[in-house]
Image (spheres, rainbow, N blue to C red):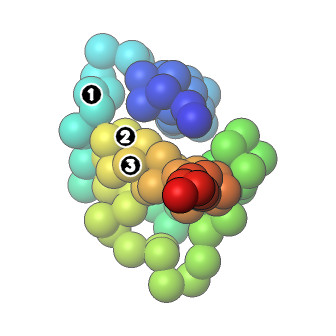
Amino acid sequence: MKEIQDVKMKILQYILEATSSIENDIKDNTLLFDEGLFDSMGLLFLIDFIRDEFKVETKDDELVVENFSSINSIAAFILNKLELKEPKKMIIIHK
């Protein structure tokens, strides 16, 4: 599974490229939409980035502010989706 810091770094790099922002201006908890870094079109491009970079599909009912408001929330969303995709290991106990 991906490390959270790696995921956050990739998200930050994407935001910096997509918005021409300065790295010092964006923290893990910066509210991306409230700060005007993203709008609805920016969200669509972000969803494409998440799909391409992390192989994570976003369902319509997951398009809520809580999942995409900050780097922290985006990383948590991605890691949660990746965790759900990993097959669960079965432990068989023989008696």
Amino acid type of the residue tagged 1 in the rendering:
Lys
Residue 74 in the image: state x and y as whole percent.
42, 49
Amino acid type of the residue tagged 3 in the rendering:
Ala
Judge whether 31 appears above or below 85 on screen. Answer: above
Q: Residue at x 56, y 32 (%)?
A: 2
* Viewport quadrant of the N terminus: top right
Q: CA distance from mark 1 to mark 2?
A: 8 Å
Residue 91 appears anywhere in the view: yes
Q: Are marks 1 and 3 in contact (CB under 8 Å)?
A: no
Q: Earlier in the sequence, mark 3 or mark 2?
A: 2
List the single residue furthest toward the bottom: 61
Residue 50 in the image: state x and y as whole percent.
64, 49
Q: Are marks 1 and 2 in contact (CB under 8 Å)?
A: yes
Q: Earlier in the sequence, mark 1 or mark 3?
A: 1
Label drawn at residue 76: 3
Residue 77 in the image: state x and y as whole percent.
44, 55
* Residue denoted by label 2: 71
Residue 46 in the image: state x and y as whole percent.
59, 52
Amino acid type of the residue tagged 2 in the rendering:
Ile
Q: Earlier in the sequence, mark 1 or mark 2?
A: 1
Say which of 91 and 62 sits in front.
Answer: 91
Q: CA distance from mark 1 to mark 3?
A: 15 Å
Judge whether 6 appears above or below 88 on screen. Answer: above
* Residue denoted by label 1: 27
